[in-house]
Image (cartoon, grey):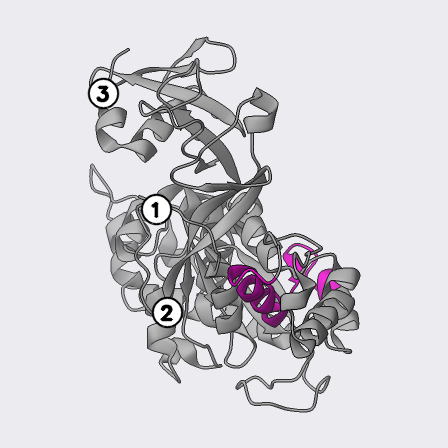
């Protein structure tokens, strides 16, 4: 799973990304630990199962801090977006290219209303960020539609050819939209929701095609609104209004600068802070300068006490666990000790989709395990479960395969 951080320039998008990916936790041997200019590790925060199981864990591919499991996830910082991006304006081409592999999107907006649609600084409260929400979604929809427009007559002829083995529209669209992480099932659902004829694409109007692309985006790249700069005076009213106006969306008030300050202070040992907490502690006040104390007090009074957190960790959590319907599963090799072969207890935690199976987990751990899957063992009950067993949140499972039997 990959979540893109999107938004127009100067709304705090890069600050949000930097805050999300800065964490003073050692995590080893994970598939995406290499970070380049715009790809990094964020973390999902969940309650670890080790207390329930009555064991002391020592994770390898994630981290556990005071009973909170921090699981690495991928975040990509997408280029700033301005109106007309779908036509190549600004960094539109780069934006859309970066967007291709994202499964969900966190749209960072300036909830204070202090930046116009081009990202230029204006008087706080003078710009309505609701317009930014709408234009970003529109640009993405127009981009998807532009990929289909040129070849729509050709696609329609292939689907309606009347041959013995006609081309199916979902399959044709998946091929046309290859590289966009769009599945046939999502296309079928979008067509059904719009009430369009799946076997008569030539009957679709231009408006029908736009509506289809709009629904497809909602399904295949769902968007969460991160209402940034919530610590500024005009933001509270805006957050309430956005939550009502976009009631079908998740709206999370955020203060990215505050989160970045807290994580940096935690990284240097000045404070004790777990991302997502509503409080922090100062282990040794004598090490805090007057300026640092003032900054921390400001974060406490204007962000944490009001919003019960900075919102950055909540936004990342909600993207993976709500938008993408993620669940957490703990694969182990010794189901009696909840450990791997080296004795590491609850060494790994994986984000899976609701509806995924035990075989899906096997493939997630290693392709060979998926290909040679025999069964899994529920570590809590000791019972065997089959390939089609539907994973549940906080499952602890041992995968048994012909390549790794016993």
| Circle 1 crowding by C-alpha within 10 Å: few under 14, some 14–19, many from 20 | many
Residue under label 3, please give it: 372
Residue 96 is labelled as 2
Q: Quadrant of residue 203?
A: bottom left
**Residue 195 visible to an observer of this rendering:** no
Q: Does 198 sit left or right of 341 as displayed?
A: right
Residue drawn at 66 percent across, 54 percent down: 248
Spot occupied by residue 328 in the image (x, y as percentages of width and height): 50, 35
Left/right placement of residue 325 relative to residue 128 reads left
Relative image position of residue 148 (x, y in whole percent): 33, 63
Q: Is residue 399 magenta?
A: no
Q: Secondary structure at mark 2?
A: helix
Q: Earlier in the sequence, mark 2 or mark 1?
A: 2
**Neighbourhood count class around disc 2 (C-alpha, 10 Å): few under 14, some 14–19, many 20 upward:** many
Circle 2 or circle 3, nearest the eye: 3
* Residue range of the region highlighted in magenta in the rendering: 242-270
Q: Nearer the viewer, residue 62 or 363?
A: 62
């Amino acid at each position: 799973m990959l979540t893109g951080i999107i938004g127009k320039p100067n709304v705090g998008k890069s600050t949000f990304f930097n805050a999300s990916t800065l964490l003073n936790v050692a995590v080893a041997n994970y598939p995406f630990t290499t970070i380049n200019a715009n790809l990094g590790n964020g973390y999902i925060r969940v309650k670890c199962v080790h207390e329930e199981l009555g064991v002391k864990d020592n994770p390898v591919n994630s981290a556990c801090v005071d009973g909170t499991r921090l699981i690495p996830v991928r975040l990509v910082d997408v280029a700033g977006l301005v109106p007309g991006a779908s036509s190549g304006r600004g960094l539109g081409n780069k934006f859309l290219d970066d967007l291709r592999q994202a499964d969900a999107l966190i749209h960072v907006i300036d909830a204070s209303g202090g930046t116009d649609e081009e990202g230029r600084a204006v008087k706080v409260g003078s710009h309505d960020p609701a317009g930014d929400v709408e234009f970003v979604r529109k640009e993405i929809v127009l981009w998807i539609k532009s990929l289909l427009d040129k070849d729509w007559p050709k696609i329609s002829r292939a689907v309606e050819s009347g041959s013995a083995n006609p081309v199916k529209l979902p399959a044709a669209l998946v091929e046309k939209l290859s590289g966009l992480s769009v599945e046939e099932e999502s296309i079928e659902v979008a067509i059904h929701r719009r009430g369009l004829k799946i076997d008569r694409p030539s009957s679709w109007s231009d408006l029908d095609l736009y509506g289809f692309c709009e629904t497809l985006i909602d399904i295949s790249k769902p968007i969460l609104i991160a209402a940034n700069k919530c610590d500024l005076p005009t933001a509270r009213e805006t957050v309430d209004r956005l939550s009502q106006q976009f009631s079908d969306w998740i709206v999370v008030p955020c203060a990215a600068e505050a989160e970045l300050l807290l994580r940096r202070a935690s990284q240097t040992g000045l404070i004790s802070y777990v991302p997502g907490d509503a409080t922090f502690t100062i282990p040794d006040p004598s090490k805090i300068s007057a300026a640092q104390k003032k900054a921390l007090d400001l974060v406490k009074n204007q962000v944490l006490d009001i919003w019960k957190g900075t919102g950055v960790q909540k936004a990342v959590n909600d993207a993976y666990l709500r938008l993408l319907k993620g669940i957490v599963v703990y694969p182990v090799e010794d189901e009696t000790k909840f450990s791997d072969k080296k004795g590491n207890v609850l060494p790994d935690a994986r984000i899976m989709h609701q509806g995924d199976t035990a075989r899906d987990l096997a493939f997630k751990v290693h392709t060979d395990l998926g290909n040679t899957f025999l069964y899994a063992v529920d570590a809590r009950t000791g019972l065997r479960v089959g390939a089609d067993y539907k994973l549940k949140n906080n499952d602890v499972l041992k995968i048994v395969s012909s390549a790794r039997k016993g």
